[in-house]
Amino acid sequence: MVRAERVCKNFGALNVLKGITLEVKRGEVLCLIGPSGSGKSTFLRCINHLERVNAGRLYVDGDLVGYREKNGKLYELHPRDAAKQRRDIGMVFQHFNLFPHRTALENIIEAPTQVKKLKRADAVARARELLARVGLADKADAYPAQLSGGQQQRVAIARALAMDPKLMLFDEPTSALDPELVGEVLGVMRELAASGMTMVVVTHEMGFAREVADQLVFMDGGVVVEAGDPRELLANPQQDRTKAFLSRIL
Ligand code: ATP
Ligand code: MG
């Protein structure tokens, strides 16, 4: 579902991604860990073309992200086609990013009605299903400020799912939450993974990574230092940098 081949990204003279190669198969969950500034968010942003890759190739569901290839040359996609690609990828951020002046339900139906041109009644019915799925059936009419952080994040997940994505990206979805609210969000993510969703998750919740992820990838300085089965990697890291990092967070 996601294939990165030697993906490089620089901001001016700053080389942030220095050749990332990895693959996430359909239905798999990949957890990405690494120190601050190692390029985790940048890599996620490249996957849905919020950032443009400078070298290497990135494919989602077989399609080159952001580009069209012709006779071995790459041409940037028309913004309209790039937007169409992005529509199939759900993204959840650290800071929920809900529209503050809209209710939970209105937040969820926004993109389906505006972008997909779904009928309002159909979008509302689907939004109610999704709210139930994330355990918030009774919060449809609440505004974000009336919800806890964990509830807001669950609305944000429901909002992403409302576009029927084939891939979900999570960038530290629980790191802004009070500790007692982390579990409810991880629970929703766990169920999503069990339902077969393909997911790339930047997180330092190692319990989640150990139990849910098919692959754990440790990034440092814009490269993949070590990757593999989460239990194996956590129990028996091979690289000194991985060992040092894990000893700081575990
Ligand atoms: P954190 O754990 O703190 O979220 P991260 O691994 O997600 O870190 P990134 O946000 O990907 O790291 O940033 C990697 C590097 O790229 C950092 O040095 C950052 O300052 C730089 N960077 C990110 N976005 C930009 C940008 N738009 N312009 C310039 N530099 C950027
Ligand atoms: Mg980040």
Image (tube, grey):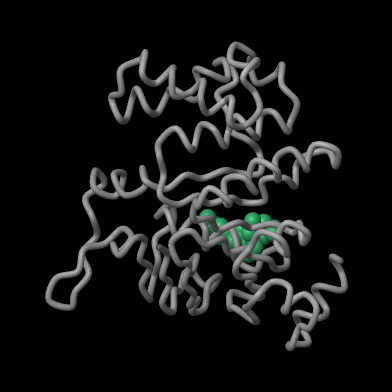
Q: Residue furthest front?
A: 195
Q: Nearer the viewer, residue 1 or 178?
A: 1
Q: Position of residue 130 (x, y in %)?
A: 52, 28
Q: Residue furthest left?
A: 71
Task: Name the quarter where the C terminus is drawn.
Answer: bottom right
Q: Quadrant of ligand 2?
A: bottom right
Quadrant in the picture for residue 152:
top right
Q: Is residue 5 left or right of residue 207?
A: left
Q: Is residue 128 left or right of residue 73?
A: right
Q: Position of residue 236 (x, y in %)?
A: 78, 83
Quadrant in the picture for residue 149:
top right
Q: Position of residue 24 (x, y in %)?
A: 48, 67
User: In the figure, 116 relative to 26: above or below?
Assistant: above
User: In the figure, 246 relative to 79: above or below?
Assistant: below
Marks counted in the figure total 0
Q: Nearer the viewer, residue 230 or 160?
A: 230
Residue at 49% across / 37% down in the picture? 160
User: In the figure, 121 relative to 208: above or below?
Assistant: above
Residue at 73% across / 56% down in the picture? 208
Q: Nearer the viewer, residue 244 or 122?
A: 122
Task: Name the quarter where the N terminus is drawn.
Answer: bottom left
Q: Position of residue 12 (x, y in %)?
A: 48, 67
Quadrant in the picture for residue 87:
top left
Residue at 49% across / 17% down in the picture? 106
